[in-house]
Amino acid sequence: MLALLLCLLPAGGLWADSGHATHDDAGSHGEGHAQHDHHGGGGSEPAWEGSPEGIAYSEFNHHLAGFLVLLIGLSELRQALRWQALAWSRFLLPGAMLTGGIFLLIWSDHEAWPIGSLSFAETFWGPDPEIIQHKTYGLLCLFVGTVEGLKRVGLFRHAAWTVPLPLFAIIGGLMLFGHSHGDHPAAQKIALHHAVMGTLAITAGSSRLLCGWRPTRLTEERSYWELLWAALILVIGFQLLIYSE
């Protein structure tokens, strides 16, 4: 998203998924947490991964992320086209990223802190890499969203502050290639979705990075890179909106 956002995009993507790798059994988390095993292997509750509730939760998260990514893409498209109207829309990107970051930190995983039974330590330092990845996306979204917001109000003017956003898209895209939903009935379909979105996020981030390094006098050439960046962000947003498991 991010996905970004994207990467974020990743992300997601830039962004939230409901499935997670299987937790350790009661010996690792304690008997009280064994019932939250994603695949139902450690407790009496049915498996969350691939269940109607789990699929609905995941699809909602993806669709919400898609809406936020589309807002980012439209904002960046206005900037790339040098439209003077709707100048306020430049704040859509930081606003969407901050919203996505908060959502990921709170609601990305139904059993993780702060809405689930897992503690803060088990959420951020536990054995489930997917939960940790979601929370990492959330923290990165908050950081990059804050940087972009401060840039847009004129507090961050140094060229170095143009790097976090495309770097986040590239890193988020790369992370998607290792983002697994575990023992999910639609695991291959989800992996393909993440691979496509990861490729788009890496390409988008690279385009934005090249755009930032171009001499300012080459405004026409620079706008082409910006248009590519904005177009790819919009494609990622539409991809997330039609996501299904």
Image (spheres, helix red, strand yellow):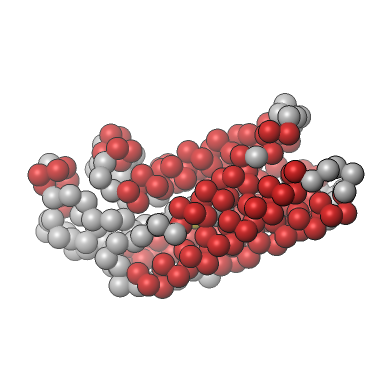
Look at 63% across and 47% down and name the residue there.
166
Q: Position of residue 67 (x, y in %)?
A: 58, 58
Depicted 245 relative to depicted 217: above or below: below
Q: Quadrant of the N terminus?
A: bottom right
Q: Is residue 142 left or right of residue 81?
A: left
Look at 41% across and 67% down and name the residue there.
191
Q: Position of residue 130 (x, y in %)?
A: 35, 51
Q: Position of residue 182 (x, y in %)?
A: 29, 62
Q: Position of residue 217 (x, y in %)?
A: 89, 44
Q: Quadrant of the C terminus?
A: bottom left
Q: Is residue 177 left or right of residue 51?
A: right
Q: Quadrant of residue 125?
A: top left
Look at 23% across and 56% down and name the residue there.
22
Depicted 159 relative to depicted 108: above or below: above
**Residue 29 seen in render:** yes
Q: Quadrant of residue 215?
A: top right
**Residue 10 seen in render:** no
Look at 55% across and 35% down and name the residue there.
143
How many numbered badges does the structure rendering display?
0
